[in-house]
Image (spheres, coloured by chain):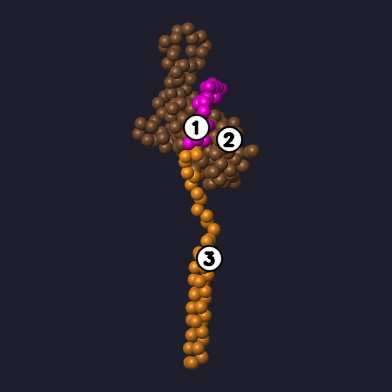
Chain colours: A brown, B orange
Amino acid sequence: MDCDADISETARGNHLAFGRIVMAHQDRIFAYLGRMGLDGAMAEDVAQETFLRVWRHAGKYNSRLGSLTTWILTIARNAALTRLSHPGGRAETPVSSETLEIASDAALPDEQLVTLQRQHQLHAALACLSAADRSLLSSSYIDELDLAAIARIEGCSTGAAKVRLHRARQRLRQILEADHE
Amino acid sequence: MNDDIDALLTGKPLVAPPGFAARLTALAQATPQLQEQSRAFRPWQWAFLGAGASLGALQLCEFVFVAFVAAGAQ
């Protein structure tokens, strides 16, 4: 059964169809939220909120306005931005448990240590960007989304999305280069 | 540096915790869905619209008739 059929079934209250939608999209949503700089617990909260909104508003989905993935990502983006805009809701620079282990585990191979340090630098650099730019950057790494779909998620024109994406990458590069020096 | 950013952003993405979909499916069963209000007119709305239109047409005919009689009387 394809996703469009599943969302129609979901709108009629079919839990199994909803479960299939969650299964098909959960990793994409988590990866998107992780790239936005949300830590595991906050990403789980936002993902849960996103999918429950999908469940409640399934009847509002219109396939003529974009794919189901685009619709779900738009909901995820709005939920994440709302969460990040609340006082105390700003994502901390996520430090994975592995990163924390670096200090105590001297036996880590050099290459792995460098990769983890670079991941940490990247997250710190991402935290310097605005939440909207992080969202734009994050959605640009979802394979099935073209620039038009990304622009729809971000609520801007394709041209504006292209320019913003270029600037966000440039800014990220500058921050990372400054860290290197 | 571009490739570096790509590698860092795509490497080791966050994934859903085990049982996430099953938990959400169970949660959905306890969550009511919002029912879309039908935008189609209901029968009583059609009846009101018809009555209003009939009344309006009747008044227009009356006005035309009165104007016609008044013009004839002059």
* Distance between mark 3 and mark 1 Cα atoms: 46 Å
* Distance between mark 2 and mark 3 Cα atoms: 41 Å
How many marks on residues?
3
Q: Please give the residue where the numbered disc 1 appears in the rendered image.
A: B23
Question: Which quadrant of the view contains residue A141?
Answer: top right
Residue A104 falls left or right of residue B58:
left
Residue A99 falls left or right of residue A152:
left
From the top left corner, tell me how far across and down residue A126 is, in percent: 45, 27
Q: Do marks 2 and 1 share a chain?
A: no
Q: Residue at x 44, y 36 (%)?
A: A81
| Amino acid found under the numbered disc labelled 3 | Trp
Asked whether B24 falls inside the magenta stretch, the response is yes
- Badge 3 or badge 1: first in the primary sequence: 1
> Which class describes the residues within 10 Å of circle 1: few (<14), some (14-19), or many (20+)?
few
Q: Please give the residue where the numbered disc 3 appears in the rendered image.
A: B46
Q: Do marks 3 and 1 share a chain?
A: yes
Residue placed most toward the observer, B14 or A129:
B14
Chain to which mark 1 belongs: B
From the top left corner, tell me how far across and down residue A1 is, in percent: 64, 38
Disc 1 is placed on an element classified as helix
Q: Is residue B52 visible?
A: yes
* Distance between mark 2 and mark 1 Cα atoms: 13 Å
| Amino acid found under the numbered disc labelled 1 | Arg
Asked whether A110 falls inside the magenta stretch, the response is no
